[in-house]
Image (cartoon, grey):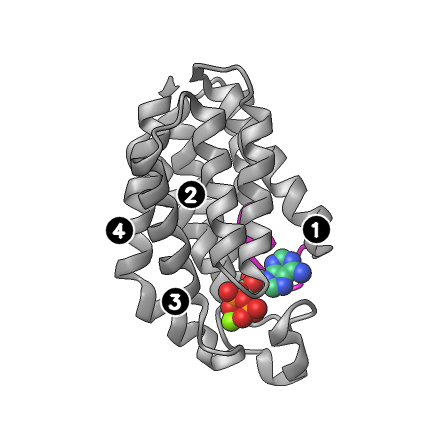
């Protein structure tokens, strides 16, 4: 089961992970964007963590909402509103729940991804974060159906997200800033797919 404290530990760790990967994500974005993705993610999760410490959330819903608001407010560009929507929808999926079982964790990610797709209108293979999130969700659903627990389920999702992330390399971007480059976006890994992979991997490392 995933508790409120497990969700807080996830955000805490994500802050560290994005701080540690700030340069890496920014370098990926410098190849096909405007070299700010790592800066954006680091800023957003540093703010989210600080706000959670300042005003401790009552439950999982409140924690995820605080993250959403912090990301929407402090992260500019495409990724801020998209990840903000992810966390806002994820929060709604956890309303009134004190703990999440495996099916609840799938529901959290499913709602989050649906929000990203609704807001950004990206389809699979458009070379965006959806290319990591969508296969991850499919892997989770499959694992849930096979009766796996949260840990195994998230490990399968991490593998699928990693494959999806790497599969963005040969793709031509059809959404976001990278799409302005046309064919020149080919041959580079998408920064948003990379930050999404890290988000799922971090959950897999912590939750069971
Ligand atoms: P910006 O492109 O505004 O500088 P970031 O650099 O923070 O914002 O984020 C770029 C990432 O956002 C891309 O690598 C891509 O994964 C993601 N992205 C951009 N547009 C969309 C979209 N319409 N749907 C889903 N993801 C998107
Ligand atoms: Mg950028």
Q: Position of residue 168 (x, y in %)?
A: 55, 65
Please say if the residues under marks 1 and 2 sit with CB atoms less than 8 Å apart: no
Of the residues tagged 3 and 2, which is closer to the observer?
A: 3
Q: Which span of residues is magenta-colored?
A: 124-134
Spatial CA span between label 3 and label 2: 19 Å
The correct choice, above or below, for 164 with respect to 29 in the image is: above
Which residue in the structure is indicated by mark 2? 200
Label 2 CB-ligand 1 distance < 8 A = no
Left or right: 151 as drawn, with respect to 67? left
Q: Position of residue 183 (x, y in %)?
A: 65, 83
Please say if the residues under marks 2 and 4 sit with CB atoms less than 8 Å apart: no
Q: Position of residue 133 (x, y in %)?
A: 55, 47
Spatial CA span between label 4 and label 3: 13 Å
Spatial CA span between label 4 and label 1: 27 Å
Which residue in the structure is indicated by mark 3? 39
The crowding category of the residue bearing disc 1, from other C-alpha atoms within 10 Å (few below 14, some 14 to 19, many at least 20), is few
The correct choice, above or below, for 97 with respect to 109 in the image is: above
Q: Secondary structure at mark 1?
A: helix
Quarter holding residue 171? bottom right
Q: Which comes sooner in the sequence, label 1 or label 3?
A: 3
Could you say which disc has been placed on residue 119 in the image? 1
Label 1 CB-ligand 1 distance < 8 A = yes
The crowding category of the residue bearing disc 4, from other C-alpha atoms within 10 Å (few below 14, some 14 to 19, many at least 20), is some
The correct choice, above or below, for 128 with respect to 31 in the image is: above
Which residue in the structure is indicated by mark 4? 16
Q: Which comes sooner in the sequence, label 4 or label 3?
A: 4
Q: Secondary structure at mark 3?
A: helix
Could you say which disc has been placed on residue 7 in the image? none
Q: Where, quadrant-wise, is the C terminus in this rendering?
A: top left
x 49%, y 59%: residue? 75
Q: Which comes sooner in the sequence, label 1 or label 2?
A: 1
């Amino acid at each position: 089961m995933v508790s409120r404290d497990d969700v807080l530990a996830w955000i805490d760790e994500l802050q560290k992970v994005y701080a540690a990967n700030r340069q890496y994500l920014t370098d990926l974005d410098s190849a096909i964007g405007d070299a700010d993705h790592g800066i954006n993610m680091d800023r957003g999760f540093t703010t989210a963590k600080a706000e959670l410490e300042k005003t401790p959330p009552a439950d999982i819903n409140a924690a995820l909402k605080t993250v959403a608001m912090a990301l929407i407010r402090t992260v500019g560009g495409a990724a801020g509103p998209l990840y903000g929507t992810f966390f806002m929808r994820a929060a709604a999926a956890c309303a009134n729940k004190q703990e999440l079982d495996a099916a609840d964790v799938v529901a959290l990610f499913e709602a989050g991804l649906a929000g990203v797709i609704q807001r950004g209108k990206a389809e699979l293979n458009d070379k965006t974060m959806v290319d990591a999130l969508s296969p991850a969700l499919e892997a989770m659903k499959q694992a849930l159906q096979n009766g796996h627990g949260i840990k195994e389920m998230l490990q399968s999702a991490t593998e699928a997200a990693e494959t999806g992330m790497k599969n963005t390399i040969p793709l031509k971007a059809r959404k976001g800033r990278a799409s302005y480059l046309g064919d020149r976006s080919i041959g580079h890994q998408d920064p948003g797919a990379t930050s999404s992979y890290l988000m799922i991997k971090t959950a897999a490392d912590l939750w069971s």
